[in-house]
Structure formats: C-alpha cells, structure tokens
Image (spheres, rainbow, N blue to C red):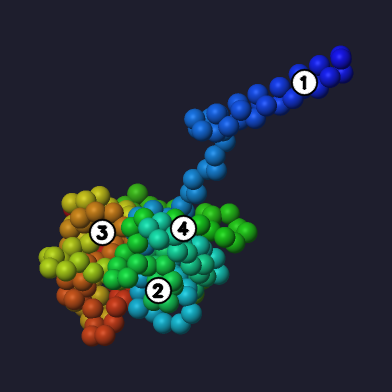
C-alpha cells in the first residue's frame, strides 16, 4: 500500500507540473523566441541592376551575405553585397522580385540579417551624417569632398508628388541639394520621412537629374542646406 501511495503522489505532482507549464505558457510566462533584430533601419528598395539576386550597401563590405525578409508576406532573399551604394541595403531587380509584393517598389516592414560569420559592424557615420572616409570597399570611387552621403543614389515611386527625398540620417524638414556629376544637373529636395538610404529621391526628383534610361546616379554630391 505504501508503494502504491508513492506512485499516486508522484503522478499527482507530474500532472500539477504539466498544468502549471500549460497555464504559464498561455499567460505568457514561458520563454518565447526573441524578435529578430534588423541590422538596417527604414524601408528597403531596389536599383535596376541586372544579374543574379544581389545587393549594394554603404555599411557592409563586398562579399557580406545578408538575408532580407519582407514581413508583410514572409518572403526572404539571401544576397551578397557586390559594391557600395547610398543605402544600408539596396537590392537589385532580381532580389527585389523575390521578396516584394506585386506592384510595390518599397518594403517598409522588413528585417535585414547578416548571415556570414563576421560580426555586423556598420561603418560609423560622421556628425553631419556622412560615412567615414575609407568605409567603402577598397578601390570604390569616393564621394566628392563636400558630399554628405556616399555611394550611388536611386529613387522610389511616388506618383504625383513634388520633388522630395527620404533619409536614414537626416530628419524630416532637412533640405538637400543633390547633383549628378555626370551631367551637372541638380535638384533641391526636402526630406519628408525615413528610409533605408542616406538619401532616396522620389521619382519627380530623380527625373530632374538622371540621364535617360539610368535609374542610378553613381557620381553625385549631396549637400545639406538646412
């Protein structure tokens, strides 16, 4: 009888423990998987570059592998950084096709993860928002001396809007002058909100400075007018 009583008591304790775990989980007491942290902030957009899925970046060196996830549809693309740009991550057309929703050229809700073995160390920015000299990959052309941003400039679609820009470094209301050094055409824009780029023009601003058929302005100067 004593043995049977011990078994009954042990079984009772086990049931109580299971019930406690179930209740704790239901009320949120149990451990949950931590939310993934993104190494980039702001929206993700793309350039018209062809080729296999890839990306450019102003913060990660050539060869870095990044996984970009669209949180609105849970589609993800793993890309390799192939060169510098004016964004934390700027996808090419093939990579964007893997993750975007039909008809959308910007991924506002996203997670960017570094998937190589190196520690994620973005290039430090200067107080004026410019990237530290030498932060771009070796051999890449540097920005003009007065430029507040580094790398190529691209754009996002914003129908019917006046020339404007978004930025991950300058607050809304900041006025910037963007000059295409290949044709000396310039546009003055006001930052209207955040993005994943040092400066991301809307299509009206891009039309004022780009060369026909080109969706990137590789040689440029960005000046802060404030």
Q: Is residue 27 visible?
A: yes
**Closer to viewer: mark 1 or mark 2:** 1
Depth check: 12 or 77 in front? 12
**Distance from Cα at disc 1 to Cα at disc 2:** 61 Å
Q: 185 or 117: nearer the eye?
A: 117
Q: Which residue is labeled 4 in the image?
A: 112
| Residue for point 51% across, 33% down | 26
Q: Secondary structure at mark 4?
A: strand
Report helix, strand or loop for mark 2: helix
Query: On residue 97, which mark appears?
Result: 2
The residue that label 3 is drawn on is 166
Residue appearing at x 20%, y 66% in the figure:
158
Give the side of residue 176 with respect to residue 62, left or right.
Answer: left
What distance separates the C-alpha of mark 2 from that of mark 3? 22 Å
Image spot of residue 213 (x, y percent): 26, 85
- Residue 115 position, x and y percent, is 57, 60
For the point 18% across and 76% down, the residue is 207
Q: Quadrant of residue 176?
A: bottom left
Is residue 86 among the parts visible in the rendering?
A: no
């Amino acid at each position: 009888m004593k043995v049977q009583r011990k078994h009954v008591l042990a079984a009772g304790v086990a049931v109580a423990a299971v019930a406690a775990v179930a209740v704790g989980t239901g009320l949120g007491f149990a451990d949950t998987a931590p939310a993934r942290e993104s190494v980039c902030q702001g929206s993700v957009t793309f350039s018209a570059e062809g080729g296999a899925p890839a990306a450019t970046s102003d913060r990660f060196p050539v060869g870095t592998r990044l996984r970009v996830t669209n949180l609105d549809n849970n589609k993800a693309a793993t890309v390799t950084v192939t060169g510098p740009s004016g964004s934390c991550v700027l996808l090419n057309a093939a990579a964007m096709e893997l993750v975007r929703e039909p008809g959308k050229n910007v991924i506002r809700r996203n997670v960017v993860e570094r998937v190589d073995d190196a520690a994620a160390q973005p290039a430090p920015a200067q107080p004026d928002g410019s990237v530290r000299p030498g932060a771009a990959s070796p051999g890449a052309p540097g920005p003009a001396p007065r430029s507040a941003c580094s790398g190529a400039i691209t754009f996002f679609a914003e129908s019917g809007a006046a020339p404007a820009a978004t930025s991950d470094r300058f607050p809304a209301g900041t006025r910037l002058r963007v000059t295409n050094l290949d044709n000396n055409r310039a546009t003055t824009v006001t930052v209207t909100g955040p993005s994943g780029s040092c400066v991301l023009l809307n299509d009206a601003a891009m039309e004022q400075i780009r060369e026909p058929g080109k969706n990137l302005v590789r040689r440029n100067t960005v000046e802060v007018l404030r």
